[in-house]
Every structure is written in C-alpha cells, then in structure tokens.
Image (cartoon, coloured by chain):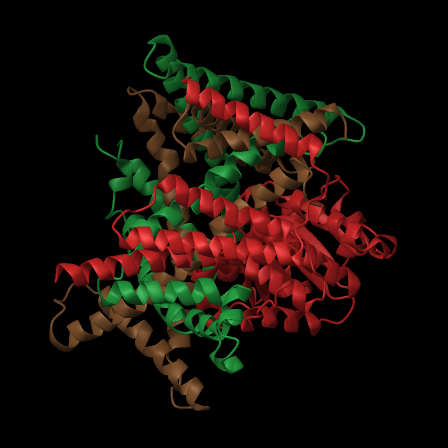
Chain colours: A brown, B green, C red
Amino acid sequence: MGFWGQFGIWLAALLTIGIISFLYKDNFLYKACEAIFVGISAGYWFVVYYWDNLYKKFYLQVTNHDITTLERIIPWIGFVLGVMMLSRLSEKIGWLSRWPLAFIVGATAGLYMMIYFVSNAMAQVASTIIPVFVGDWATIIANFFIVAGTFCGLIYFFFSKEHKGAFGLASRVGIWFLMITFGASFGYTVMSRMSLMIGRIDFLFGAWLGLIK
Amino acid sequence: MKREIPVAITFIVGTAYLIAYFIPHKPFNYFENWFNDWFAVIAAFAIWLGVLNLIKISTIKIFQKKPDWPYSVLIIISFVIIVFFGFYEGYKGLYAHPSYSFRDPGTSFDWLYVNVYTPLSATMFALLAFFVASASYRAFRARNFEATLLLLAAFFVMLGRVPVGDILTSWLPHQYQLSQWANWIMNVPNTAGQRAIMIGIALGLVSTSLRIILGLERSYLGND
Amino acid sequence: MKRNEVITVGLLVFLVFILKFIIPKPVQLSYTVSMITIILLGLVFVYILIRTLQGRLIGRRVVFLLVGISLSLPFFMKLTLNIPVSPEVRSVYDALQKLPPGSKVLASFDYDPPSAPELQPMAVAFMKYAFDHGLKVIIMGLWPQGPQQADQAIQSAFKAEPSLKKKIKYGRDYVNLGFQAGNEFVILRMGESFKAMFPSDLNNTPYDSIPLLNNVSNFSNLDFCMNFSAGKPGTAEWVQIAVDRFKLPVAAGNTAVQAPMVYPYLNSHQLVGLLGGMSGGAAFEKLTKKPGKATTYILSQSFAHTVIVIFIIIGNIAYFSRKKENK
C-alpha cells in the first residue's frame, strides 16, 4: 500500500476517533469532524448530481445528434424548470420556484398514488382476508393474530370515531399489536446500530492497527 | 397566476402518470419518460439549491464573525476540495483513454469518499449504538402493560436473532427456543402491526395525492 | 485545553503507539482467557446492579465504555456459535437453489459504504453462491456507490475462492451496468427496456456488445432479482414496481432498520425471502456454507445485544424495587 493509501487509513482513523470523542464530551475535534462531514457531504452530492443527472440526462441528450430534433429540445424544458428552482435563493423572484416544485409534487403524487394503492393497500388487504381456521393449531393461531392484529391496528388509526365501547376495546388491542411491532423495530434498530459500530471497530482494529486479521 | 399555473402543472403531470399506469403505450409512455428525465434534472437543481444555501449561510457566518465561525471555514474548505476533485476527475476521465468515471477507484474523488466521507458518515450513525444503550439503562421502564409488551418484544427479538438466545434456552425443545419466538414475533404480530401502518399510510397517501392532483391541497406552494 | 485533557490525549497517543508498533499481531485470546473475560464482565454487571438498586445510577460514560468493550473484545476471541436460521432466510436460499445453471439474475446494489457492515457480507455470500452454481448475474445500482460495492463483493469472493476467478469471465458470467439516477423511475423504465436506462456498462462497453445481455431486453427475460437495500430507493420500490407491475420474483437483503417494515411484503408473497441485518447475513453464509464477515461479526453482535438486555433488566429491577419501597 503506497503513501496515500496509508495516509488515507490514518486520516479515516483520526476522523473516526474524532466523532467517537463526542461520547466523552463535546470538543473541538468532534466539532471539526462534524464541519468537515457537512462540507464533504454537500460537495459529494453536488458533484454526483451534476454528473449523473445534469450531464447524463440533459447535456448528453441535447448534444446527441443520433436522435430527432424534438428529442434534443425536450430536455431543455426540464433544464429551465431546474434553473427556476434556484430562484428560491432570492426573495423577490422566489415564487418562480413553485413551477418546478409543482412538477415534482405532481409527478410524485401521480406515480405513488397507484403504486402505493396496489402494493401497500390492495395487496396487503388481500393477504389479510385469509381463511383463518385451516391447517394445524399453530397456523390457526398465527392466521388469527394476523387478521385480528391488522384489523385492530387499523381501528386504532381511525380517529373519526371516539374510541369507546367495543370500538375502544378493538383500538386497545390494536395498540398492543403496535407496541409489539415497535418493540421488534427497536430490537432490529439496536442490531443495525451495533452492526455499524462493529464495522467501525473492525476498521480500527483491522485496517488501522492491524491487531486482527 | 402565481398559484394557478403551478396547480395546473401539478394536475397535468399527475394525471399523465396516472394515465400512463393504465395505458403504458404511445404517447403516454413518452410523457412518462420525458417527465422522468426532467425529474432527475430538477432534483439536481434542488440539491444544488440546498448546497448553495449552505454556502451562503456559512459565508455570512464567517463575514459577520458569528460564534463558531471557524467551523464554517472548514465547511467551505472541505466543500471546495471535494467539488474541485469531482469536476477535475470527471472532465479528465471524459477525455482519457480509456475513459473513466470521476468515482472510479483510484481517483482523488474516490479517495476522499473512502477516507473522509465514509468514516465520518458511518461513525455518526454508529454513535447511536452507545446512546441506545444509555437510554435503555436510564429510561426504558416497563411502566405499564403496553411498555412491557414493547420491552418483551424487544428482548425476544434482540436475543432470538443472535446465537445467545438459543444458548440461554438450549434446555427447551427446539420449537420453544428464543430464536423460534423471535421468528414468530416477526412473522405474526410484527407483520400485523406493520401491515396496519402500511395500509393506513397507503390510504392516506392516495387521498392526499388525489387532493394534490385535483388542486384541493395547495400547502406545498407556501404562502404569498 | 485543560491539563487533564492533555494528559488523556497523550495517553491515548501512547496507547495507539503500543498497539500499532509494539504488540505482536494478530492478537487472539485463548478459550480460557475468553471465558474469564466474560465472567469478569458479568461481575461488573453485578456491581452495576447493586449500585443501581442503591439508587446510584452509573454515569453514561461508564455505559459507553462497557458497550465499547462488549463490541471490541469478541474480535479477539475465537468462539464459535450456532447461528439460528430464520424461515425468511431459508426462503431466499431455497429460491436460489431452484434456479438452474445459466439462469439470469439481476442483482441490485442499493446501498453505500456506511451500510456495508450489514449488507456487504450477504452480498459476498450471494456472489460466491451465484458463481459457484453457474448463475449469470446482471449488476446495477440505484445508489451511486452500489455498483462499486458490487465490484468489491466480487473481488472478496475471488479472494476467498481463487478457483472462481479462473472460471468466471466478465461479460459472459456477470456484468456491471453501473448506477443510474432516477430512483423508482429507473425501475419503471427498466420494465420497458434495460438498454434505454443502461446504454452501456460501467466500462462504457455498449449494451449490445455484451454477450450476457443478448436476449435480455427487460424484466420478462430475467429469472430472479436479488436486491440489497439500505433505504430509499430500495426494496419497497422494487416490490411496488418490479414485482407488482412486472411480476419479477424478488428477494431482498436489508439493513436491520428496514427489515421489520418489509415483513408484510413477505407475508403477502410479494417478496420471495428476506435477509435481515447482520444476523440474516450470517444465516445466509451458514446455509450457503460460505462463512464470511457476518459469521465473524455475529459474536460481537451477540455480546452487544446481551449487554443492552442486561442494562434494560438492571434498570427495571431497580425501578420496580424502588416502586415497592415507596409503596
């Protein structure tokens, strides 16, 4: 590994330790690492979006002579809308940014409306309307819990009716299922964060200090 | 007209996507493809807007010598360095033989990404591991039935998903060991709860999308 | 800087010097020493329990130190544990088993290096399996660094099994189409035409010149899709568009944060199977008989989870005992 490779590893280790030093207390090194992170992230996405979006999807299209004139002109509409987005930096002409914003909101609304309805609503409802009392007792209990849990969970989220009586009881059962869901999510979140820290420790002990293979 | 034209744009674009879902043939697939490319270009400018805003705020902080202004200098320096190498490597790669991308291994941009951005980003998220532990010790209490359910589910999943769970319950038959309980919790009550949330969000999203497309919901336009 | 802080920094620098240049490597604790270490840690927790019962909560820095120790020590221990395999991981493996050699599999790498500790091990195990069983892999990414993570996974697979490097040929057995911006719109367009989204591969070789991509025009020409996802765009988008619209069978490897949220897709059979977090990766390595980083890391993971559970239990024991006293 050459000089820049070794220097890179030491720099990465120093930055890692700088961030971890926050656990002791807020300090100059942590704040410096945080500032570098903000600057580098902003710069990274600035560059990536230029090359992957603007260059590939606009510049290469408008300078491509193998396509029709109409296909070369169409990308300019997107470019103009994009430039209008930058008007948000000025208070006077900031209202111009509403046009590209409206485009983004409309596109997202139009696309998501159908795909969410089909995949996250219809398919899920279809998988909930299942015969409960089939198979062995373990399957029956599981089916019952899934149907009852989904139904009661949905009842909890229905705030147009007061949660009283039988409705209130179903809502309460829904809360229990949601609590189990959140507990499971908490467990998995712990797993995820620990995994990230394990990755960092592997880097510090392995690539940097060479204590482990 | 400051609000009417954007509402019309939302309606046209939203409707085009809706129609293209059901009729994915000419000319609707052309509209979809054009709109997809415009979306990418506008997204790039949206990111640039955020970045330029950050630079503007940092610069103001430096010139007005506000508290912690030296860190703003660091922000701008690191931004300039990575942007310089990003564009330099990008243009150099375009005309090299064979051509290469600005992010290919071996470029300065990639070096900065691997040795600066990645450790900072990964460690920032990894710090949460410690705070989760501290919060668990200090605040995670089974104060009522619901909190107890949450705690127990977390226990079963955390221990059941690693070998420790089965070691602790090795004296039980296999189907009653912690890993099986974790499987059951994830596949049954967790699925039910997540499904309820998913359906709720989907229905809410459908109704909000429809309201936005029809122009009934205009909060995204801000105030005049 | 205060005097104490200067001393602390000086000690840390000295410690790094010792660890880097003096201590013989690699460091490995014997089984006996590992067990003694675990017992000592247990005694520390007993002490913490007693203190907490007395109403004297330990400081947060001690908690952080204990978490750090529980994550670090297992790296030096050589203990093997039996990794549990969940039904959703087995479903992924069974689905891959059913694919005959020559099947075309799309592998979407939708993550970046910060998520690599969780997803890279399962990606490496998948690539080893695919190359071993003659599956043809078409790699792409919806995240900018995804295709590079794929390249690293392939290099790791070749390093672990040098025989693979000799028999696997780029362009014939696998191809890397690179990253394409556009999130779910990319998947949408791929349903119509791969070439429209990826006119060339990562090395700028034209689409039509790549042998593997002959007769591959869209999703209908694929046999399977394996998605490695750390967020958005990711598994949800693949299910919503590739599965529900284009009927492509998709299995997913997710970070642990995302995994619980995709279980409804599993139950409704929109997803074939799921590798959830590091434990999913370790289980997949076990099933494919290709132990890797996930298997190594699972010991640290076990320690960490145990420590968190112990802290929660200690906190609650103290809470309930004080509640009883107040009554």
Quadrant of the image for the N terminus of chain B? top left
Residue at (32% x, 37% y) in the render: B6
- Residue nearest the observer in this picture, C38 or C266: C38
Q: Could you tell me if residue B111 is visible in this image?
A: no
Relative to C197, A94 lies left or right: left
Q: Is residue A72 left or right of residue C310?
A: right
Judge whether B160 appears above or below B18 on screen.
below
Residue A54: x and y in percent read 55, 31
Along the line of sight, the residue nearer the viewer: C53 or B68 = C53
For residue C30, side relative to residue C301 (left or right): right
Q: A203 or A45, which lies in front?
A: A203
Pinpoint residue B174: horizontal percent, then vertical percent. Answer: 53, 80
Does A183 sit left or right of A211 as displayed?
left
In front of the other: B64 or C138: B64
Vertical placement of residue A127 versus A197, above or below: below
Q: Is residue A199 visible?
A: yes
How many marks the image carries: the answer is: 0
Where does residue A122 sit, x and y in percent of width and height? 39, 69
Query: Considering only vertical position in the picture, is C198 above or below B76?
Result: below
Residue at 57% in and 19% down:
B81
Q: Quadrant of the C terminus of chain B?
A: top left
- Name which residue lies at 42% across and 32% down: A22
- Outermost right residue: C166
* Residue C146 in picture, x, y percent from top left: 62, 45
In this rendering, is residue C266 above or below C298?
A: below
